[in-house]
Image (spheres, rainbow, N blue to C red):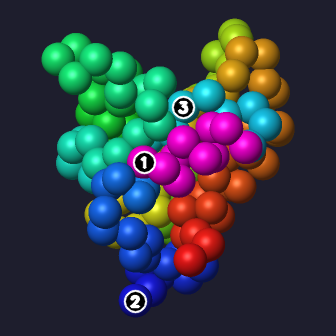
Amino acid sequence: MNSGPGRRDVLLSDPAIVGRLLQQACDEIDGIEHAIMTSRDGLLIAANKESTGDDTADTLADRASAMAAAGAGIGDHFTQLVSHGRLQGSIFEAEQGCVGVFPISTTLLLVVTSRTSVSMGRFSVAAKRTLQLLQSPDP
């Protein structure tokens, strides 16, 4: 099922499998520190191990999920305001790295953070590789 031009639904319904793919992205893709899948309304689906921490804690993954939903909503409104089509992603550049929020289906978002001192260009490439890994996992 296709969610629009150039976008495929992620057919991964098992959070454990998604978590392993997100961990694989962090382990294998240079520059990626955290990878989190969340629903568009901010509910955490899965994350790499370092993002989830202690089960009882207010984790990075939990907080990032909520903020990603808000960021994607704002990005959707900006792109509609200027008639540029559907949001493909938002990247926030900070002094020491980047954070990206990417719609991966009509209901899911991917949040990716960079390691310290990764440039926006390198981060953009690494984040897109993470998206590809989720959308085309090896069987």
12 vs 6: above or below: above
First along the sequence among labels 1 and 2 = 2
Circle 3 SS class: strand
Q: Quadrant of residue 1?
A: bottom left
In the figure, 48 relative to 105: above or below?
above
Q: Sequence order check: which comes first, mark 3 or mark 1?
A: 1
**Which quadrant: the C terminus?**
bottom right
Which residue is found at the position 81% from the left and 27% from the top? 119
Magenta-colored segment: predominant secondary structure: helix
- Residue hosting label 2: 1
* Secondary structure type for disc 1: helix
Q: Callout 3, which amino acid?
A: His
The amino acid pointed to by label 2 is Met
Disc 1 to disc 2, C-alpha distance: 22 Å
Alpha carbon separation for disc pair 3 and 1 = 11 Å
| Residue at the spot 47% in from the left edge and 62% down from the top edge | 104
In the rendered image, which residue does mark 1 sit on? 19
Q: Can you tell which mark lies on residue 34?
A: 3
- Judged left or right of residue 76, residue 28 is right
Image location (x, y in percent) of residue 11: 40, 76
Q: Earlier in the sequence, mark 2 or mark 3?
A: 2
- Callout 2 environment at 10 Å: few (<14), some (14 to 19), or many (20+)? few
Near-viewer residue (19 or 3)? 19
Residue closest to the eye, 8 or 84: 8
Counting from the top left corner in percent of width and height, residue 52 is at 35, 27
Magenta-tinted stretch: 19-28
Residue 19 appears in view: yes
Instruction: Tell me, yes or no, whether the highlighted magenta stretch contains residue 25.
Output: yes
Disc 2 element = loop
Task: Nearest to the eye among marks 3 and 1: give it.
Answer: 1
| Residue 89 on image: x %, y % | 55, 51
